[in-house]
Each structure stands twice: as structure tokens, then as C-alpha cells.
Image (cartoon, grey):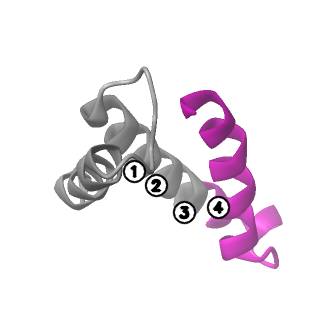
Amino acid sequence: MVEVVRSINDHAKQNGRLESKWDTEVIASTIVSIFFHTMMSWLLPHHQKSDIVKMFQQHFDVVWGGIR
């Protein structure tokens, strides 16, 4: 999974669509970590009724602000 995200990030950097001071490996690892954290959080009983996609989007948006 990290390899796929890393490849997407590399492609975006090469095409000028992503400008970041962070290494592609760090970005990819962070995005995958957000994904798994969201899944683990959603599995907790008090989050079961939450929209997992919305949860991921919120977590991603917070971190993405720091990546750019």
C-alpha cells in the first residue's frame, strides 16, 4: 500500500502538482498511517455509526495542510 501511495506522490512531484519539503516516503507512510488509524478508530463502539469516509477525509485534511 505504501508503494502505491509513494508512486502517486512521485508522479505528482515530477509533474509539478505536488510541491513539498517532505520526502515521498514520509508522505506515503503518513497517508497510510492515517488510513489505518481511521479504520482502527472507526472500529471502536462509539464510532461505529460514524461515516468512515468522512472521518478519513477530516484526518487527511488536517495532515495534508502540514504536508503542503
**Residue located 73% across and 63% down the image:** 55
Q: Whole-Å distance between the Cαs marked 3 and 1? A: 11 Å
- Name the magenta segment's main secondary structure: helix
Q: Which label is found at residue 13?
A: none
Instruction: Give the foreground label among 3 and 4.
Output: 4
Q: Which residue position is annotated with label 3?
A: 39
Mark 1 vs mark 4: which is more N-terminal?
1
Identify the amino acid type marked 2.
Answer: Phe
**Rendered image quadrant of residue 29:** top left
> Which of marks 1 and 3 precedes in the sequence?
1
Quadrant for residue 22, please give it: top left
| Mark 2 element type | helix
On the image, numbered disc 2 is attached to which residue?
36
The amino acid beneath tag 4 is Phe
Q: Which residue is mark 1?
A: 32
Instruction: Based on the picture, tell me whether residue 47 belongs to the magenta stretch.
Output: yes
Q: CB atoms at circles 1 and 2 under 8 Å apart?
A: yes
